[in-house]
Image (cartoon, rainbow, N blue to C red):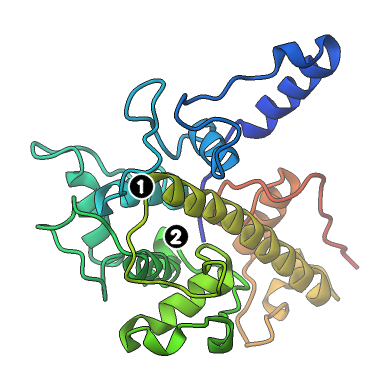
Amino acid sequence: MKSKLKRGAALLLATATCLTTMVGSALAASPTFKDVPETHWAYSYVERAATDGIVNGVSPSVFSPSTQVTSAQFFAMVERVCMPDAGWTAGEGTWYEPYWNMASAEGYNLVKGTAITKNNFNAAISRYDMAQALYNYNNISEVGSSGYGGLYGITPASPSQIKDYNSIPEKYRTAVLWAYGAGALKGDEKGNFNGSNVMNRAEAATVMVRMEDIIKACDKAEADANMKAVLEHSKTSLYDNYQKATYSDGRVYTKEYVDLLKENAANGYRLTGNAKFAEGTYEIPVT
């Protein structure tokens, strides 16, 4: 899966920490939005979402955290977190036309199984449809060519973990279990999913920050698993005998694959994207 997350949050945080240590708490950053103070439950999520370019305020100093989030706004966040550089550009219609084109595009079809249509794209999105959209992203059919989707190592939740599971419409159950297990969407304090509820902007920002972390974690786990597989199968030189190095399911490593894997690992990047997963260089032993 390709996320291409190019964020400066770590550098900004390190810089802020250094400054605070040097001159004291007087230089601590002020909240970005005056309606999301440090005491707000979603403060850390909204601040990071703004820093990472996931969300914008309704004005430079106002976020409007309690305003319902629409499908259009949500898919704009999905594009920024999950599918940046996908090439969707504004047309002659509404501001959200490119996001509808992305969400409904053949091969992506992120709105499959939802109640979302072009006509209601700018209406509030339910938790059910949010879960379904994220699940659809995970199952993008063109993962082989696009590099998107196919998050590695996600274990769906058990129905017993969701108190109101039996009330979830059958068509949404798989998606809800996946989103719950991934940690993107969680239940309330009583363990209910409340899928018919709509989300506000603060809640949506929280979900997409979690999704950003999930993607990074899955990328790292996938890259580590790929490297482990390469190392386990490098009994002989992969450069001289790469046809003999195979996955457990019988797929064959090509020389091009090994070259690319080594190059990306050496630069700290995963195989099919640009999300940094580790520091340091991996060496493939040659005998």
Number of other residues with Cα within 10 Å of mark 2, as a class: few under 14, some 14 to 19, many 20 or more: many
In this image, 14 relative to 209: left or right?
Answer: right
**In front: 46, or 238?**
46
Number of other residues with Cα within 10 Å of mark 1, as a class: few under 14, some 14 to 19, many 20 or more: few
- Assign a secondary structure to mark 2: loop
**In front: 39, or 258?**
39
| Count of marks overlaid on the render | 2
Q: Which residue is located at x 45 percent, y 51 percent?
A: 203
Pointer 1 residue: 86
In this image, 2 relative to 249: left or right?
Answer: left
Pointer 2 residue: 148
In this image, 129 relative to 23: left or right?
Answer: left
Position in image of residue 103 (x %, y %): 26, 58
**In front: 104, or 26?**
26
Position in image of residue 87 (x %, y %): 31, 43
Q: Which residue is located at x 37 percent, y 65 percent?
A: 127
Position in image of residue 1 (x %, y %): 52, 61
Q: Mark 2 and mark 1 in contact (Cβ < 8 Å)?
A: yes
**In front: 259, or 33?**
33
Q: Which residue is located at x 77 percent, y 24 percent?
A: 17
Position in image of residue 64 (x %, y %): 36, 35
Give me the C-alpha separation between circle 1 and circle 2: 10 Å
Q: Quadrant of the C terminus?
A: bottom right
> Which amino acid does the dot numbered 2 rest on?
Tyr
Picture layout, residue 91 above or below residue 13: below
